[in-house]
Amino acid sequence: MLKLGLMDTFEIWKKHFKFAIRIWMNQVAGTVKNNKSVQHIEIVRKGVPRGTIQQTYSRLMADSWMVFTLKVVLTFFLLNLLFAIGYFLIPDSINGLAGQDFLVSFNFSVQTFSTIGYGGLIPNGTASNLLVAVESLVGIAYLALLTGLLYSRFSRPIPSFQFSDKMIIREIDGKNVLQFRVMNTRGHELIDVRAQLNLLLFHTNSSGQRDARIYELELRRSHAPILMLNWVFEHVIDEESSLFELYDGEGFSEELTLYATVFALDGTIYQSVYLNQIYQVDDIACKHRFVDMIDSDGKRATIWTDRLHQIMRIKE
C-alpha cells in the first residue's frame, strides 16, 4: 500500500510537470514568434559552454514574466518534492507519520523550505534533523537568489519610446529620403537622445563564401537634447549612401536588413535606456508619408499615439 501511494503521487506530479512544461514551451514559442529580431534572423551559436551561472542568470533576466514565474514555481515544487521523498524514505522521520502518508512529508518539506515552522510537524531522529538542516540552507539560498532576481528585473530600466513598424521613402527637395519615427510613450522627458541606422548586407566573395557586411547610414539629425513627443529620422539616399545603388525608385533590388537604434537618458530614473528595431524590405513603403501625429493650437500640443504606425500613399 505504501508503494502504491508513492507511485500514484509520482504519476500525479509527472502529469502536472509535463503539462507545465508544455505551457512553458508554448509561451517561449510565442515569445520567439513575436520577437522581430528573432523572427527575421536566427542566430545559432555552436561550441558555447552550457550551464554556466552567467548564462543561467542571463536567461532568467531575458525571460518573460510568465516564463520566469513558471520557472520559479516549478523549481520550488521540485525541490520540495525531492526533500519530501527523503523524509518519506526515512522511517518515522516526522512524528512517526512520514512512513504512512507522503503528503505529510511534502507539507513538512514546504514548511521547512520556506522557514514557516508551525510546530505541528517536528523532525524525529538524527537523519531527519540533518535533512532539515540541509533543506533550511537550500531554502534560505533559494529565497535570497529569488529576491536578487526580482530586484534586478524590477529595477531594470524599460525604454519609454516606441518605433514605427514601417519605414517610408518619399521625395523631399528632389531627393529620395528614407524615414522612420520614434514616439515617447510616457509623459516624462527623454534626455540626450541619440540614434543610429545601420545596413546589413550579405555578400558572396570570389571564393564562394558568404559573409555579412555592416554599413552605417548617416542620419540628417542623429542627436537631440530632449524628446517629449515624437521624432522623425531621415536618411538621404544620394550618391554617398550605401542604399543608392540598391534603390531603383520603386523598391530595392536585393534583400537587406536595416537596424535602427535609439539611446536616451530617462529623465525620471536617470538611467540610460535603449531600444532597437529591425526593418526588412517588406517593412519599407515607397512613395508614402507618415500621417501627422501632433495637433497644436500654439498653447497645447496633443499627440495621437495610435497614429504612430499609420502611413498614406503620396498622390502623384
Image (cartoon, grey):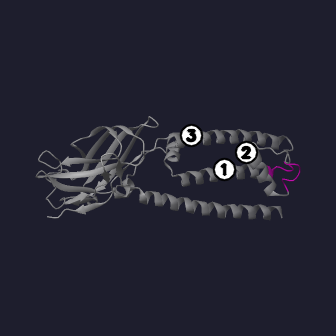
Label 2 is placed on what type of residue? Answer: Phe
In the rendered image, residue 122 lying in the magenta stretch gets the answer no
Q: Viewer-proximal residue, 86 or 137?
A: 137
Per the image, label 2 sits on a secondary structure element best described as helix
Quadrant position of the C terminus in the picture: bottom left
- According to the image, label 1 marks what residue? 76
**Mark 1 touches mark 2? (CB < 8 Å):** yes
**Mark 3 touches mark 2? (CB < 8 Å):** no
Q: Judge whether residue 212 can be spotted in this image.
A: no
Q: Residue at x 63, y 52 (%)?
A: 73
Q: Viewer-proximal residue, 277 or 47?
A: 277
Label 1 is placed on what type of residue? Answer: Phe
At which x and y percent is residue 159? 42, 45
- According to the image, label 2 marks what residue? 113
Upstream in the sequence, badge 1 or badge 3?
1
- According to the image, label 3 marks what residue? 151
At which x and y percent is residue 101? 83, 58
Range covered by the magenta-colored residues = 87-99
Q: Residue at x 37, y 54 (%)?
A: 305
Quadrant position of the N terminus in the picture: bottom right
Choose mark 3 or mark 2, whichever is in front. Answer: 3
Q: Judge whether residue 125 can be spotted in this image.
A: yes
Per the image, label 1 sits on a secondary structure element best described as helix
Q: CA distance from mark 1 to mark 3?
A: 19 Å
At which x and y percent is residue 138? 69, 41
Q: CA distance from mark 1 to mark 2?
A: 9 Å
For the image shown, how many numbered marks are present on the structure?
A: 3
At which x and y percent is residue 191? 36, 37
